[in-house]
Amino acid sequence: MRHYVSLIFILLIFISCTAKQEVPGQEAVEQAILAMERQALDRWSAGDPVGFAENAADDITYYDDIAAQTRLDGLEELRSYLTSLEGQIPAHDYELLDTRVQVYGDIAISTLHYQPNVDGEPGPLWKATDVYRFSNGEWRMVHAHWSLVKQE
C-alpha cells in the first residue's frame, strides 16, 4: 500500500513540475492574430485564395457564402475548395473594419468586417469569425465562418 501512495505522490510531483505551455499576453495575441489575418487576406486579395489556408490547423472547419454552404472538415478539404476558386478572385485592395480579438487561454476569436475595393469601387461587405488555438508554440486557425453582410 505504501508503494502505491509513494507512486501517486511521485506522479503528482511530476505533473505539477511539468512545464505548462506559455500563452503570450492579450496584446501580443491580438497583434499576432491580426497579423495572421492580414497575411492570409493579402494573399486572397492578390488573387491567391489558397493562401487563406496557410494559417489553418489540420482539423479546421470552414463555412462561407461563396460556395461552401456545407461545412468543410479538415485542411485538405479547405485547400481543395480554395483551389477551386483560383482565377475567380480578382486582385483588389481591402480594409479590415471593426476588428476584435478575444482571448480565452489557448483560444482566440477574431471577428471583423472585410471591405474589398476593386478599381476604387467598394465590393460586398463581409463579416467573419475566425477561431484560433495555441498549440506547440503557435496559433492555428481551427474554424472560420465568412458571410455577406445583408444589405437593407
Image (cartoon, helix red, strand yellow):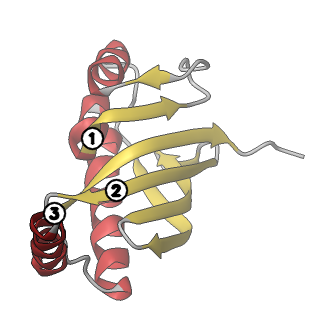
The residue under the point 57% across, 48% down is 121
Which quadrant is the N terminus positioned in? bottom left
Residue corresponding to mark 3: 4
Q: Which mark is residue 35?
A: none
Q: Amino acid at mark 3?
A: Tyr
User: How far is disc 3 from disc 2 in space, using C-alphas?
Assistant: 37 Å
Q: Which mark is residue 133?
A: 2
**Front: mark 3 or 2:** 3
SS category of the residue bearing label 2:
strand
Q: Residues within 10 Å of mark 1 (few under 14, many from 20)?
A: some
- At a point 53% along the width and 70% down the height, the residue shown is 99
Q: Earlier in the sequence, mark 3 or mark 2?
A: 3
Is disc 3 surrounded by few (<14), some (14 to 19) or many (20+) residues within 10 Å?
Answer: few
Near-viewer residue (129 or 95): 129
Q: Nearer the viewer, residue 4 or 147?
A: 4
- Under circle 1, the secondary element is strand
Instruction: Answer left or right for 23 relative to 93.
Output: left
Nearer to me, 27 or 35: 27
- Type of amino acid under label 1: Ala
Closer to viewer: mark 3 or mark 1: 3
Decide: few, some or many residues near mark 2? Use Cα within 10 Å; few <14, some 14-19, many ≥20. many
Rounded to the nearest whole Å, what is the CA distance between mark 3 and mark 1?
40 Å
Q: Is residue 31 above or below residue 106?
A: below
Residue at the image position 40 percent from the left and 20 percent from the top: 88
- Splitting the image into 4 quarters, where does residue 86 fall? top left
Q: Quadrant of residue 35?
A: bottom left
Residue type of the residue flagged with mark 2:
Arg
**Residue at numbered disc 1:** 57
